[in-house]
Amino acid sequence: MADDIACELSSLANNAAFNSSKLSIALSGGNTPLTLFTVMGAVYSSKTDWRRVEFYWSDERCVPPESHESNFRTAREAFFDKARIPSKNIHRIKGEEDPVKEAERYSDLIRKRIPVKRGLPAFDVILLGLGEDGHTASLFPGDEKILESYRICEVSEHPATGQKRITLTLPVINNAERVIFMVSGRNKAEIVAEILNNSGSDFYPASLVAPWHGKLYWYLDTGSASLLGQLA
Ligand code: 6PG
């Protein structure tokens, strides 16, 4: 699964390089993408001209960049350092800053750097993970204010830990050219089946990801796909 996604991102990056254009990729957080980042760093660095790629995040925990909980740190250690990605191509969310101010700063950065389509920034690729509760990025079930927001970024709060997060909003996610869910593990099988068998209520933020003009991809491993077709 990681190799399939890394291969897709590599070819998108090489096409961008060939066309002397730029590619914007918003990386997901949590544990699942670690294998992807490792493959991108170890296998695809020599085959990919990453110089045309600008890296952003779908969400970030409000922790310092050296924290083990930092989504930036995960990507830096597994991918950026190995592939020697120039720091000017890396636009991390500054988890160490005041969350409200940082959400505004990051929204401004995105507004300035990402092409606009239908009045909103249109990322080329947005990577997403999926929580067992149906959350994605840091959009959590029941957080209506954030789920209805038309801002670019919002400050959210993890329902169990209270940890502040900064997240892209649903309109920005749904305005992307490609949205890629990457879900691994048997513990995600129930939520994946509920969402993909369309029995998932709109209660789940991940069910609300439906790109307006772009393409939606679900990359699943055997564990997370193991109940598809059974919970219909
Ligand atoms: C985060 C992520 C979050 C994650 C899911 C799945 O910052 O934690 O953005 O949405 O993708 O919680 O996490 P795992 O990959 O660790 O299962």
Image (cartoon, rainbow, N blue to C red):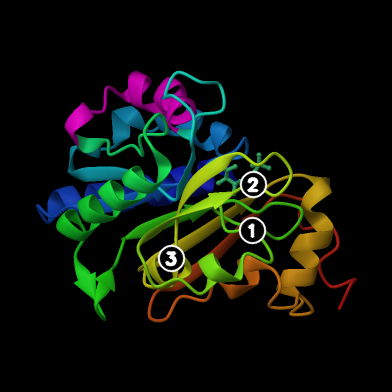
Q: Which corner quadrant of the image does residue 227 belong to?
A: bottom right
Nearest-to-viewer mark from 3 and 1 = 1
Q: Which residues are magenta?
A: 72-88
Q: Which mark is residue 140?
A: 1
Q: Which residue is mark 2?
A: 158
Residue 63 in the image: above or below residue 49: above
- Residue 216, horizontal then vertical, whole percent: 50, 69
Mark 3 or mark 1, earlier in chain: 1
Nearest-to-viewer mark from 2 and 3 = 2
Q: Please state if 43 lies on the left or on the right of 210 as rendered.
A: left
Dot 1 falls on a residue whose secondary structure is: loop
- Mark 2–mark 1 Cα distance, whole angstroms, equals 7 Å
Q: Which mark is residue 132?
A: none
- Mark 3–mark 1 Cα distance, whole angstroms, equals 14 Å
Q: Is residue 129 magenta-colored?
A: no
Q: Please state if 227 lies on the left or on the right of 72 as rendered.
A: right
Q: Which residue is mark 3?
A: 173
Q: Is residue 79 magenta-colored?
A: yes
Dot 3 falls on a residue whose secondary structure is: helix
Amino acid residing under circle 2: His
- Mark 2–mark 3 Cα distance, whole angstroms, equals 19 Å
Give the main secondary structure of the magenta stretch.
helix
Amino acid residing under circle 1: Phe
**In what quadrant does ligand 1 lie?**
top right
Which image quarter holds the C terminus?
Answer: bottom right
